[in-house]
């Protein structure tokens, strides 16, 4: 299953570095850091970037 993970550049929640969980995905994978003071609610704070990832994952 192709996967795109997203993270906001202002996400204050504790979380591992994306490279720590990369191997959990067996299909095509991409991680995107969304800039512009974006927190952890990407659909609300960065709706265009979120929608773009939903569209782009179909092309991975």
Image: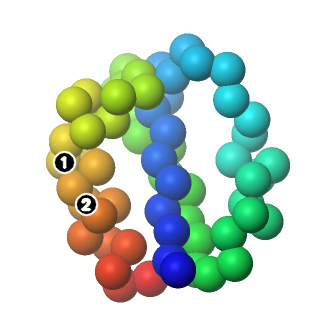
Mark 1–mark 2 Cα distance, whole angstroms, equals: 6 Å
52 left or right, relative to 40 = left
Q: Position of residue 49 (x, y in %)?
A: 27, 49
Badge 1 marks a residue whose secondary structure is helix
Classed neighbour count for the residue bearing mark 2: other residues with Cα under 10 Å, few (<14), some (14–19), many (≥20): few
Please give the name of the residue rendered at 22% of the width and 31% of the height, measured from the top-left corner.
Answer: 44
To which residue does mark 2 refer?
A: 52
Badge 2 marks a residue whose secondary structure is helix
45 vs 56: above or below = above
Tell me if label 1 and label 2 are in contact, CB under 8 Å.
yes
Please give the name of the residue rendered at 45% of the width and 32% of the height, measured from the top-left corner.
Answer: 8
Q: Position of residue 36 (x, y in %)?
A: 34, 27
Circle on res. 21: none
To which residue does mark 1 refer?
A: 48
Please give the name of the residue rendered at 68% of the width and 29% of the height, measured from the top-left corner.
Answer: 15
Q: Position of residue 53 (x, y in %)?
A: 33, 61
3 vs 40: above or below = below
Q: How many marks?
A: 2
Q: Quarter-wise, where is residue 14 in the image?
A: top right
9 vs 27: above or below = above
Q: Quarter-wise, where is residue 37 in the image?
A: top left
Please give the name of the residue rendered at 75% of the width and 35% of the height, measured from the top-left corner.
Answer: 16
14 left or right, relative to 28 = right
Residue furthest out toward the top: 12
């Amino acid at each position: 299953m192709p996967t795109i993970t997203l993270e906001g550049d202002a996400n204050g929640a504790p979380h591992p570095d994306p490279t720590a969980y990369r191997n959990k995905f067996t299909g095509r994978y991409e991680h995107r850091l969304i800039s512009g003071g974006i927190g952890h609610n990407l659909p609300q704070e960065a709706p265009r970037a979120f929608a773009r990832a939903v569209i782009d994952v179909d092309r991975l």
